[in-house]
Amino acid sequence: MIEKFLDLLRDEGPFLPNRYTIALGKRIREARLESNMSQAKLAEKAYFKQSSISKIEAGTRSVAAEEILYLSYALDKPIIYFFPKEFVYELSENELSLLEKELLIQVRHLSKEDMRRLIAQARALVDLSDR
Protein backbone atom coordinates (compact mmCIF):
# COMPACT_ATOMS: atom_id res chain seq x y z
CA MET A 1 0.00 0.00 0.00
CA ILE A 2 2.69 2.53 0.98
CA GLU A 3 4.65 1.59 -2.14
CA LYS A 4 1.71 2.66 -4.32
CA PHE A 5 1.59 6.03 -2.55
CA LEU A 6 5.34 6.55 -2.85
CA ASP A 7 5.28 5.59 -6.53
CA LEU A 8 2.71 8.32 -7.17
CA LEU A 9 5.05 10.92 -5.69
CA ARG A 10 8.46 9.49 -6.64
CA ASP A 11 8.89 11.46 -9.87
CA GLU A 12 7.88 14.73 -8.26
CA GLY A 13 10.46 14.79 -5.48
CA PRO A 14 9.97 16.81 -2.30
CA PHE A 15 8.85 19.93 -4.14
CA LEU A 16 5.51 21.65 -3.68
CA PRO A 17 3.01 21.65 -5.14
CA ASN A 18 2.88 17.96 -5.95
CA ARG A 19 0.00 15.67 -6.91
CA TYR A 20 -0.80 14.86 -3.29
CA THR A 21 -0.81 18.44 -1.96
CA ILE A 22 -2.89 19.61 -4.91
CA ALA A 23 -5.47 16.82 -4.42
CA LEU A 24 -5.56 17.45 -0.65
CA GLY A 25 -6.02 21.18 -1.17
CA LYS A 26 -8.91 20.52 -3.50
CA ARG A 27 -10.59 18.23 -0.90
CA ILE A 28 -10.18 20.87 1.82
CA ARG A 29 -11.57 23.62 -0.41
CA GLU A 30 -14.58 21.41 -1.34
CA ALA A 31 -15.31 20.68 2.33
CA ARG A 32 -14.94 24.35 3.26
CA LEU A 33 -17.32 25.49 0.54
CA GLU A 34 -19.77 22.71 1.43
CA SER A 35 -19.74 24.09 4.99
CA ASN A 36 -20.30 27.65 3.69
CA MET A 37 -17.11 28.81 5.39
CA SER A 38 -14.66 31.45 4.33
CA GLN A 39 -10.95 30.72 4.48
CA ALA A 40 -10.74 33.10 7.44
CA LYS A 41 -13.47 31.25 9.35
CA LEU A 42 -11.87 27.86 8.67
CA ALA A 43 -8.51 29.23 9.77
CA GLU A 44 -10.05 30.42 13.03
CA LYS A 45 -11.82 27.10 13.72
CA ALA A 46 -8.79 24.95 12.82
CA TYR A 47 -6.09 27.12 14.45
CA PHE A 48 -4.40 28.20 11.23
CA LYS A 49 -3.58 31.54 9.68
CA GLN A 50 -5.83 32.46 6.76
CA SER A 51 -2.77 32.60 4.49
CA SER A 52 -1.96 28.98 5.45
CA ILE A 53 -5.45 27.85 4.41
CA SER A 54 -4.97 29.64 1.10
CA LYS A 55 -1.60 27.92 0.54
CA ILE A 56 -2.98 24.52 1.55
CA GLU A 57 -5.90 24.86 -0.87
CA ALA A 58 -3.44 25.83 -3.62
CA GLY A 59 -1.30 22.80 -2.84
CA THR A 60 1.76 24.90 -2.02
CA ARG A 61 1.85 24.01 1.68
CA SER A 62 1.92 20.51 3.11
CA VAL A 63 -0.30 19.54 6.04
CA ALA A 64 0.98 17.71 9.12
CA ALA A 65 -0.95 14.81 10.64
CA GLU A 66 -1.90 16.92 13.66
CA GLU A 67 -3.25 19.61 11.37
CA ILE A 68 -5.44 17.02 9.61
CA LEU A 69 -7.08 16.43 13.00
CA TYR A 70 -7.85 20.14 13.39
CA LEU A 71 -9.26 20.32 9.86
CA SER A 72 -11.31 17.18 10.45
CA TYR A 73 -12.92 18.72 13.51
CA ALA A 74 -13.42 22.17 11.97
CA LEU A 75 -14.98 20.80 8.77
CA ASP A 76 -16.87 17.95 10.45
CA LYS A 77 -15.30 15.35 8.17
CA PRO A 78 -13.72 11.99 9.02
CA ILE A 79 -9.94 11.91 8.84
CA ILE A 80 -10.00 9.59 5.83
CA TYR A 81 -11.79 12.35 3.87
CA PHE A 82 -8.50 14.25 3.73
CA PHE A 83 -6.70 11.48 1.87
CA PRO A 84 -7.64 11.79 -1.79
CA LYS A 85 -8.99 8.58 -3.30
CA GLU A 86 -6.01 7.99 -5.57
CA PHE A 87 -3.80 7.79 -2.46
CA VAL A 88 -5.99 5.47 -0.37
CA TYR A 89 -6.07 1.69 -0.42
CA GLU A 90 -9.68 0.58 -0.46
CA LEU A 91 -10.91 -2.75 0.80
CA SER A 92 -13.20 -4.71 -1.42
CA GLU A 93 -16.25 -6.34 0.11
CA ASN A 94 -14.77 -9.82 -0.24
CA GLU A 95 -11.81 -8.79 1.94
CA LEU A 96 -14.10 -8.21 4.95
CA SER A 97 -14.86 -10.94 7.46
CA LEU A 98 -18.46 -11.71 8.39
CA LEU A 99 -18.00 -9.88 11.71
CA GLU A 100 -16.65 -6.79 9.93
CA LYS A 101 -19.60 -6.80 7.55
CA GLU A 102 -22.04 -7.13 10.47
CA LEU A 103 -20.37 -4.21 12.23
CA LEU A 104 -20.74 -2.02 9.15
CA ILE A 105 -24.39 -2.95 8.77
CA GLN A 106 -25.10 -2.03 12.40
CA VAL A 107 -23.13 1.23 12.20
CA ARG A 108 -25.46 2.48 9.48
CA HIS A 109 -28.24 2.65 12.07
CA LEU A 110 -26.29 4.96 14.41
CA SER A 111 -26.39 8.73 14.59
CA LYS A 112 -23.29 10.65 13.57
CA GLU A 113 -22.46 11.36 17.21
CA ASP A 114 -22.87 7.69 18.18
CA MET A 115 -20.59 6.71 15.29
CA ARG A 116 -17.91 9.07 16.63
CA ARG A 117 -18.27 7.50 20.08
CA LEU A 118 -18.00 4.01 18.60
CA ILE A 119 -14.85 4.95 16.69
CA ALA A 120 -13.30 6.40 19.87
CA GLN A 121 -14.13 3.20 21.75
CA ALA A 122 -12.72 1.03 18.96
CA ARG A 123 -9.48 3.04 18.99
CA ALA A 124 -9.24 2.65 22.76
CA LEU A 125 -9.69 -1.13 22.42
CA VAL A 126 -6.97 -1.28 19.76
CA ASP A 127 -4.64 0.75 22.00
CA LEU A 128 -5.28 -1.61 24.91
CA SER A 129 -4.66 -4.71 22.80
CA ASP A 130 -1.37 -3.25 21.52
CA ARG A 131 0.03 -3.09 25.06
Image (cartoon, grey):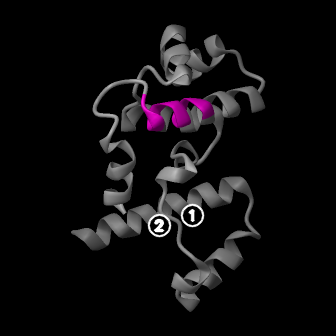
Magenta stretch mostly in which secondary structure? helix
Q: How many marks?
A: 2
Q: Residues within 10 Å of mark 2 (few under 14, many from 20)?
A: few
Q: Amino acid at mark 2?
A: Ala
* Nearer the observer, 8 or 27: 8
Horizontally, residue 113 falls left or right of residue 6, namely: right
Q: Residues within 10 Å of mark 1 (few under 14, many from 20)?
A: some
Say which mark, if any, is on residue 122: 2
**Position of residue 71 measured from the top left corner of the image (x, y, whole percent):** 54, 32
Q: Amino acid at mark 1?
A: Leu
**Position of residue 22 measured from the top left corner of the image (x, y, whole percent):** 52, 31
* Nearer the observer, 60 or 10: 10
* Nearer the observer, 42 or 111: 42
- Give the quarter of the figure containing the N terminus: bottom left
Residue at figure coordinates x 51%, y 83% from the top left:
95
Residue topped by disc 1: 118
Q: Secondary structure at mark 2?
A: helix
**Position of residue 58 measured from the top left corner of the image (x, y, whole percent):** 54, 20
